Amino acid sequence: VFRHFDTDSSGSIEGEELANALGRFGYRLTPYLLSLVETKYATVPLNQSQQPLYGPRATAGMTFDRFVRACVVIKTLTGTFQSLDVNRTGRVSLDYEQFLAVVLSSP
C-alpha cells in the first residue's frame, strides 16, 4: 500500500501523495489539516553528520512507520469523534476533561 501511494518512489509520502492516500482510505482532510499531519509525522532529513537538514534541500516526508502511525491516529480520532457525534451533525461538545481524555488516549 505504501509503495502504491509513494508515486515518486522517494521512500516517503508527502504532499499530494498523503492527500491521495488518506482520501483513498475515506478521510477528506482540509489542506490545513493535511499540513498539520505532514508536519507532525514528517521525518526530518539528516546531513552526512547526522544533523537535521533545513532549507531548500530538506524534503521532509513520512517514512512507512510514521505514515502508519499517522493513519492509526487519524482512524482512532475519527472513530472517537463519530462515537461522540450521536446526532451525526459533524459537531460535538466536550468539556476540558473529555477533550484531554480523547487526546491522551490516542496512540
Image (cartoon, rainbow, N blue to C red):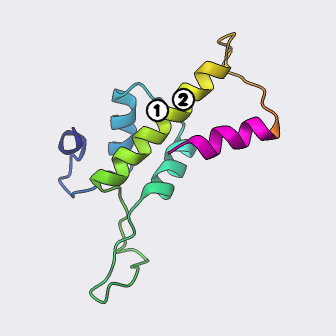
User: Would you call the spot at circle 2 few (<14 residues within 10 Å), some (14-19), or many (20 or more)?
Assistant: few
Q: In this rendering, would 39 be left or right of 11?
A: right
Provide the residue span drawn in magenta. 97-107
Q: In this rendering, would 101 be left or right of 107?
A: right
User: What residue sits 67% from the left and 21% below the top?
Assistant: 84
Which label belongs to residue 62? none
Asked whether residue 103 is drawn in magenta, I would say: yes
At numbered mark 2, what does the secondary structure look like: helix, strand or loop? helix
Q: In this rendering, would 33 be left or right of 49?
A: right
Q: Is residue 102 visible?
A: yes
Q: Mark 2 points at which residue?
A: 78
Q: Mark 1 points at which residue?
A: 75
Q: Nearer the viewer, residue 71 or 24?
A: 71
At label 1, the amino acid type is Lys
Q: Which of 23 and 100 is in front in this view?
A: 100
Q: In this view, does 37 lie above or below 39?
A: above
User: What residue sits 34% from the left and 72% below the top?
Assistant: 45
At numbered mark 1, what does the secondary structure look like: helix, strand or loop? helix
Q: In this view, does 72 lie above or below 59?
A: above
On the image, the x and y values in percent for residue 53 come to 39, 79
- Magenta segment's dominant SS is helix
In which quadrant of the rendered view does residue 99 lie? top right
In which quadrant of the rendered view does residue 86 lie? top right
User: What residue sits 23% from the left and 43% below the top?
Assistant: 2
User: What residue sits 22% from the left and 57% below the top?
Assistant: 11
Circles 1 and 2: CB distance less than 8 Å?
yes
Which residue is outermost to the right?
A: 95
On the image, the x and y values in percent for residue 41 come to 44, 55
Q: Can residue 29 be seen in this view?
A: no
Give the CA separation, mark 1 to mark 2: 5 Å
